[in-house]
Amino acid sequence: MLEGRHVRLRPLDAAADAEALYGESHPPAGDPGLWTYLPGGPYRDAAAYREALLDAERSDDPLFFTLMTLPDQRPVGIASYLRITPEHGSIEIGHIWFGASLRRSTAATEAIYLLAAHAFDELGYRRLEWKCDALNQASRAAAERFGFRFEGVFLRHMVVKGRNRDTAWFAITDEEWPAVREAFNAWLRPENFDESGRQHQRLADLIAAARG
């Protein structure tokens, strides 16, 4: 379990999480476009989603986490480690979706920080990867905001939901991580936000400054 001020990541529990996660990711509250670039979904109802989550719960790679806001501990999203390759010191984060109440929140950014910090600082990985459909502009922008460097596009890399997928690759290395970590910590400080929760400094600007 990974925990910050605003979010907790714990192992996925299909039985406990399905109903809340379905509500966060399907209408009327959820955005149906969330599923466009994910390998599964959307699902006809919470029971069908629970069945899919049961398969995910049994998986070791990807290794799935439920994202829960604090202090209410409500399931609001999913993330995972995948392509876990300790012999090469490489690990990826993916299968990420933020529910309706998590998008554009401090908790969402903190969740990514917790995954990165655990991979580098506790598990000792050398490389953290982020991959997405090259057409997924929102995911590409998120990767760069979180400090991942764009490394290129693998053409005709996969077939997802019957469509060709060119895959955009991003990564942070252990050599870059201290600067990125410093920027995340600066951004997450309470004094970086006004009384309405609006940021004073952007994370991307802090990362650029930390990297020099």
Image (tube, rainbow, N blue to C red):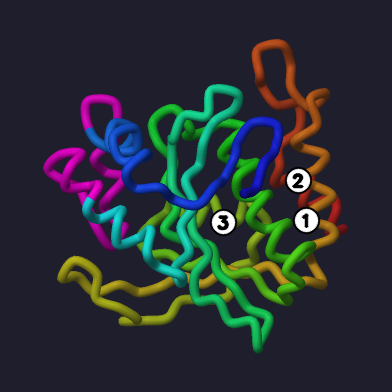
| Residue 159, position as x, y percentages in the image | 24, 76
- Pointer 2 local density, CA inside 10 Å: few below 14, some 14–19, many at least 20: many
User: What is the x, y in percent for residue 129?
Assistant: 58, 70
Dot 1: what SS?
A: helix
| Residue position marked by numbered label 2 in the rendering | 184
Label 1 sits on what residue type?
Answer: Val
The amino acid on which the numbered mark 3 sits, given as a three-letter code, is Ala
Q: Which residues are magenta?
A: 27-50
Identify the mark at residue 180; answer none if there is no mark. Answer: 1
Residue 16 appears in the rendering: yes
Instruction: Say which quarter of the image contains residue 92.
Output: bottom right
Across and down, in percent, residue 105 comes to: 56, 31
Most common secondary structure along the magenta stretch = loop
The answer to whether residue 138 of the structure is visible from this angle is no
Residue identified by numbered label 3: 143
Between 56 and 30, which is closer to the camera in this rendering? 56
**Mark 2: amino acid:** Phe
Indicate whether 127 appears above or below 200.
below
Dot in front, 2 or 3: 2
Q: Is residue 70 above or below residue 34?
A: above
Compared to 94, does 66 lie above or below?
Answer: above
Most distant residue in the left direction: 44
Secondary element at image label 3: helix
The reply to whether callout 1 and callout 2 are in contact (CB within 8 Å) is yes
Residue 41 falls within the magenta-colored stretch: yes
Q: Quadrant of the C terminus?
A: bottom right
